[in-house]
Amino acid sequence: MVGAAVCRRLSQEPGVVLLTRPRDELDLCDDDAVARFVEKERPATVIFAAAKVGGIHANQSFPVEFLTDNLRQELSTIHASYRFGVRRFLFLGSTCIYPRLAQQPIREDQLLAGPLEPTNEAYALAKIAGLKLCQYFRQQYGVLYHSAMPTNLYGPGDNYHVEHSHVLPGLIRKFHEAKITGAPSVTIWGTGTPLREFLHVDDLADAIVHLCKLANPPDWVNVGTSVDISILELAKLIAKVVGYQGAITTDPSKPDGTPRKLTDTSLLRSTGWVPGVPLNEGLIRTYADFLEETQSGRLRSI
Ligand code: GDP
């Protein structure tokens, strides 16, 4: 989802030649294959949008894969980039790198200020390692390796798996199917009270291009809207956009995860970037994308 959005955005930039490879042609966990690719193509800049990602249930169920796959992908790519002369590397992480009970809104200096949220600890540890490795390369070897930490993302190309997806695509699918089958109610996981912030992936792509143009970017910077919403309110909004009129119930036996995850985006704003897609508009666009992906058989659900 992120890589495709970055390519769409970069295709509007004059003079940019995109070097991409699908997963079945280049396995980022394979050090030698990654080194051969970077040596041959010699990119000037690498934008690292690859990751093994998933929602609260997937993260909790597969911590081994979430830690090892993400570590291997980032280690192979960062090391090969340095070895073959890449001067600029933009590493993407997530705001789940911050402590479970971080001071809200979360500033960048909250990193490592307390224990992580257990439901996504493995993913967060991998992303913290990648962010720190980029910082160390910059400090030790003078290359411009820096990071961006986006809040919860959504948009075209998202994963709509019923159990493994994040909340926003998961609920789009549930409400859509409930509308089609005429189900009287839809149950959302947890209490509905956790607060989350959502960023359209096209906004992230725009922020990435902006960061890549800065001569002296921060080592890591939050990317978000600084506006949050409860999961129950999000569910109501999605029901409205989808056109579902039944009831919404909660299932407190499912985990809530971190109670609140609101980013302080003043550092990014101070460099001259603001988001452009309000949640309501982003949801309308995303539901249209979902319908289009469903009808064309391209819907991702893995
Ligand atoms: P998180 O932001 O890392 O916690 O990941 P998620 O996007 O998976 O979950 C966010 C919140 O939405 C959690 O409190 C979930 O319990 C809640 N939630 C409610 N319904 C769903 C659902 O159908 N799928 C997912 N993934 N989360 C849901």
Image (cartoon, grey):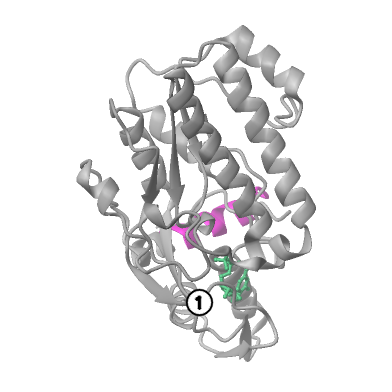
Q: Residue at 64% across / 61% down in the picture?
A: 120
Please check the rendered image and state whether residue 189 is part of the magenta-colored stretch, yes or no.
no
| Residue 79 figure quarter | top right
Instruction: Identify residue type, mark 1.
Output: Pro
User: Is any part of residue 95 visible from this angle?
Assistant: yes
Q: Please state the extent of the stretch shown in magenta in the rendering.
A: 285-298
Instruction: Compare residues 36 and 161 and report the one nearer the observer.
Output: 36
Toward which corner of the image does residue 62 lie, by quadrant?
A: bottom right
Residue 167, compared with residue 296, is above or below; it is below
Q: Main secondary structure of the magenta part?
A: helix
Look at mark 1 in the image and give the residue it sits on.
Answer: 259
**Image point (67%, 51%), residue name:** 300
Q: Is residue 112 left or right of residue 21?
A: left
Residue 287 inside the magenta-drawn segment: yes
**Quarter of the figure that contains the N terminus:** top right
Between 97 and 203, the one lying in front of the other is 97
Label 1 packing within 10 angstroms: few (<14), some (14-19), many (20+): few
In the displayed structure, would residue 247 be above or below residue 266?
A: below
Write down which quadrant ligand 1 falls in. Answer: bottom right
Where residue 153 appears, as percent x and y from the top left, is 48, 55
In this rendering, the answer to whether 273 lies above or below 164 is above
The image quadrant that residue 34 belongs to is top right
